[in-house]
Amino acid sequence: MKIEDLGEFGLIKRLTKILKIKDSSVVVGFGDDCSCVNISGQLVLFTSDIQIEGRHFVKNLISPQDLGWRVVSVNVSDIVACGGKPRWGFISVSVPPELDFEYIEQIYTGMEKACRYYKMDIIGGNTSSSEIIILDLFLTGITERFVPRGGATEGDYILLSGYTGLSRAGMELLKMKKDSYEDFEERLIKNHTTPVARIDIADRINKFASSCIDISDGLAGDLSHILHSSRAKAVLYREKLPVSQDLKSFCRKYSKDCLNYILFGGEDYQLIFTVKEEHISYFSDCFVIGRIEEGSGIFLKEGNNIKKVPEKGYQHL
Amino acid sequence: MKIEDLGEFGLIKRLTKILKIKDSSVVVGFGDDCSCVNISGQLVLFTSDIQIEGRHFVKNLISPQDLGWRVVSVNVSDIVACGGKPRWGFISVSVPPELDFEYIEQIYTGMEKACRYYKMDIIGGNTSSSEIIILDLFLTGITERFVPRGGATEGDYILLSGYTGLSRAGMELLKMKKDSYEDFEERLIKNHTTPVARIDIADRINKFASSCIDISDGLAGDLSHILHSSRAKAVLYREKLPVSQDLKSFCRKYSKDCLNYILFGGEDYQLIFTVKEEHISYFSDCFVIGRIEEGSGIFLKEGNNIKKVPEKGYQHL
């Protein structure tokens, strides 16, 4: 059997069966945005995210500084999604020996900028050579409470920390390789190249979210992970799904369907999370987009009309 | 300037200047076998080591199970070299979608075997797709004392945990792609494909070593890291350098110079460390190969004859 026949999640499921965790200080193992270990009473989160040239980025379409920013941000996003704050990163860099030093220097400058923004440190690393550029960041964080994917219960409200679909639109614009872009197009591209992890709401996620995940695979795809883990159903309200002005302009100009971008565009690094009714007031800067019900699947409600939303997200394999 | 003009260590030196560590809980940052953080009074070690197809291994020359064992062992070796015990690993796996599932299953089986041997757990991971196989393990460990590279002082004895040069001989044998190998050749190959990190002496390293490093770049190359960090000189005794019977057979058969393998062969994952005279008796199973003196450089003493040893090791870039 080929790996592509299993898909990313089928593969992970099979492989993690082999690695049985015996250590009782491991609070969370495989299957969430982060793993979690209790070290002398401190909950420590572990995550990693790799950026491979030609697979996760195209060298000529992203500046090395943005690439450095990006690899830190996507990892911080996982830590925040589990209710934590990033602390100590360890960077694994592989580059072709004939690469200009200035290029990798710029990657590090981008990482340093991100470290300052997120108030964390990269404390060590490993370098080796390869045909292509590979950046793999391992990031730890600390938290007082692990916010899992599987904590959503009936009646919880579903919240979204910001607009989605922008990164995908930005990626498509980049690939058009136009000589010049309109202002809104530049902004969409920036959403793709330099995502910002929502560390600004980390404390509130830690205190109030019953479940949380970051949007790397798309709103529907990532929400479905919450639903599978929580054994629950989501009803989203069509008119509550936020549509950014820039995405509207993009969809008008290129005759695209906004909803498709909002639900299935990936790599936004916004958070989708659930909260109890009494905690909604703490999130006035976020969008309430639906509710958790008993059952399974994602449904979209528009007036009296309800339809099932496919759970497809970007599959990285 | 190209990266290859800087070399691995020149590159690391330049890059780590960009990432200044601000967090006072970081005990050791860049420049040793591991980084080290104080988490609620517990010293936690961080390391990582990547295995890239075509660069660190050739797919047809190593079994996937051995590859899984190897990626764990080389990381454990770094933890032990800093006086620690391995605890929690996080694995980043990138594979071509058309790869057979059984191949990656075997890699995981090898990792699981290693986890059991070293009494540690891999607690999470990240999978993605790529053209080639990439395995990147991040490993944390715990220790009561960080054993640094830079702790050797005048009068310390230099000890070696086992034979060196075997892995390099094994690699050369593998590359000959012979139809059949003699028994001693099979053993040398095994030294290369399935190195065993010296966890068996981890407790004694923690208690008694004034400095320590594991041998990935070759005895001379890695000893020179201890000397640079400790600002010291090493005098090695030619007749005390251990030569394994298998390496002797190899060098006789293929007309090679044993000393070249012993000093400059890499990837043995033995430990080279220094101890005070009063602690030597705890290491009767190791080889005392020389002493630390004031000065710099590595010198080889044979009778009354002393000559300088070049510090070249395998440079991974």
Image: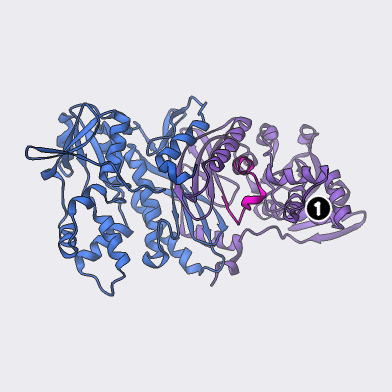
Chain colours: A purple, B blue
Vertical relation: B6 (above or below) A30: above
Please state if A48 lies on the left or on the right of B294 as rendered: right
Q: Looking at this rendering, what residue extends furthest in the left direction?
A: B303
Q: Quadrant of the C terminus of chain A?
A: bottom right
Total label count?
1
Amino acid type assigned to the residue bearing label 1 in the image:
Val
Badge 1 marks a residue whose secondary structure is strand
Q: x, y percentage for residue B108?
A: 45, 59
> What subunit carries mark 1?
A
Examine the image and state in which quarter residue B215 appears.
top left
Q: Residue at x 28, y 33 (%)?
A: B227
User: Which span of residues is magenta-colored?
Assistant: A50-70
Which residue shows up at 42% across the image and 38% down it?
A: B10
Give how far across and how far down residue A180 sits, in percent: 79, 47
Number of residues whose C-alpha sits closer than 10 Å to that of mark 1, classed few (under 14), some (14–19) or many (20 or more): many
What residue is drawn where x is 89% and y is 54%?
A: A302
Q: Is residue A244 visible?
A: no
State whether residue A8 appears in this view: yes
In the depicted structure, whether residue A92 falls above or below residue A10: above
Q: Residue at x 60, y 56 (%)?
A: A54
- Residue A257 image-quadrant placement: bottom right
User: Disc 1 designates what residue?
Assistant: A235
Query: Is A228 on the left or on the right of A170, as rendered?
Result: left
Query: Which residue, as the protein is rendered here, is positioned at the far front?
Result: B1
Q: Is residue A286 above or below residue A316?
A: above
State left or right for residue A135 relative to residue B275: right
Expressed as whole percent of the image width and height from the top left, the position of residue A90 reads 49, 40
Q: Position of residue A135 (x, y in %)?
A: 54, 47
